[in-house]
Amino acid sequence: MRSYWCMTMSQLVALLLFCNKATGRAALDWETRVKISLGMARGLAHLHAEGSGKFIHGNLKSSNILLSQNLDGCVSEFGLAQLMTTLPAPARLIGYRAPEVLETKKPTQKSDVYSFGVLLLEMLTGKAPLRSPGREDSVEHLPRWVQSVVREEWTAEVFDVDLLRHPNIEDEMVQLLQVAMACVAVAPDQRPKMDEVIRRIAEIRNSYSGPASPPEETAAQAP
């Protein structure tokens, strides 16, 4: 059985999402983004199921999602957040923190789900979790921006322009956006469990590229 955790680093999701654009390299296509998202979901669900359901990642972000050579998403840095709780969080990490964690400083599995939702929004929008719309002193969280655009019924405006070049995938993008928005619900009890997230993402992937791997198969490989 393959492991959910990468033991060697291949590539970071953050680099592929943002540095590829900056350097003019080809952007991640839709199928690859869905595949990575499913791998991330399986890794986090595996973590949440271990230790009698007591394990929490607490520091999920695109720069600690690693990719194998086959572009399978792998969760890393589990446990390190607990060792660094006395250090202030860099501003870029705040964009992944659930509202209740910003107040209580205590992550939970539900706050992990929120962070995962932000990762999905990054996949869909190609934007960083914190945005500066127009002014250097003005900061907007990615979930709030997406919510404001969707409320105005301009849903297509949230998607990465590189994705919009691919034909016949808008329905799948909207479905994944709905999953992401459920994950970043303000109220923790309104967020789905990761098993439900896996099921919904797998259905989306099936509709686009054929049957996905069964849930028990993992999305990362150990050497």
Image (cartoon, rainbow, N blue to C red):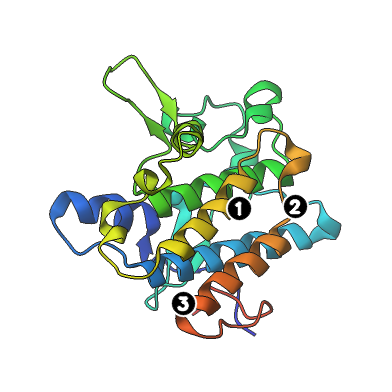
Give x and y (percent) for residue 216.
69, 79
Seen as rendered, the residue at the extreme left is 24
Residue assigned mark 3: 208
Say which mark, if any, is on residue 78: 1
- Tag 2's secondary structure? loop
Whichever of callouts 3 and 2 sits on the residue coming sooner in the sequence is 2
Label 1 to label 2: alpha-carbon separation: 9 Å
**Kind of residue at disc 1:** Phe
Q: Residue at x 73, y 41 (%)?
A: 108
Instruction: Please state the total of marks drawn on the protein image.
Output: 3
Give x and y (percent) for residue 173.
45, 60
Between marks 3 and 1 in the image, the one whose residue lies nearer the viewer? 3
Q: Residue at x 29, y 67 (%)?
A: 166
Front position in the image: 70 or 135: 135
The image shows residue 150, relative to residue 7, as above or below, that is above
Seen as rendered, the residue at the extreme right is 52
Position of 57 with respect to 87 (left or right) is right
Label 3 to label 1: alpha-carbon separation: 31 Å
Residue 92 lies in what quarter of the image?
A: top left
Position of 80 with respect to 46 (left or right) is left
Label 1–label 2 contact, CB within 8 A = yes
Give x and y (percent) for residue 122.
42, 48
Between marks 3 and 2 in the image, the one whose residue lies nearer the viewer? 3
Q: Residue at x 81, y 59 (%)?
A: 51
Position of 11 with respect to 101 (left or right) is left
Front position in the image: 160 or 217: 160
Q: Residues within 10 Å of mark 2 (few under 14, many from 20)?
A: some
**Kind of residue at disc 3:** Tyr
Residue assigned mark 2: 55
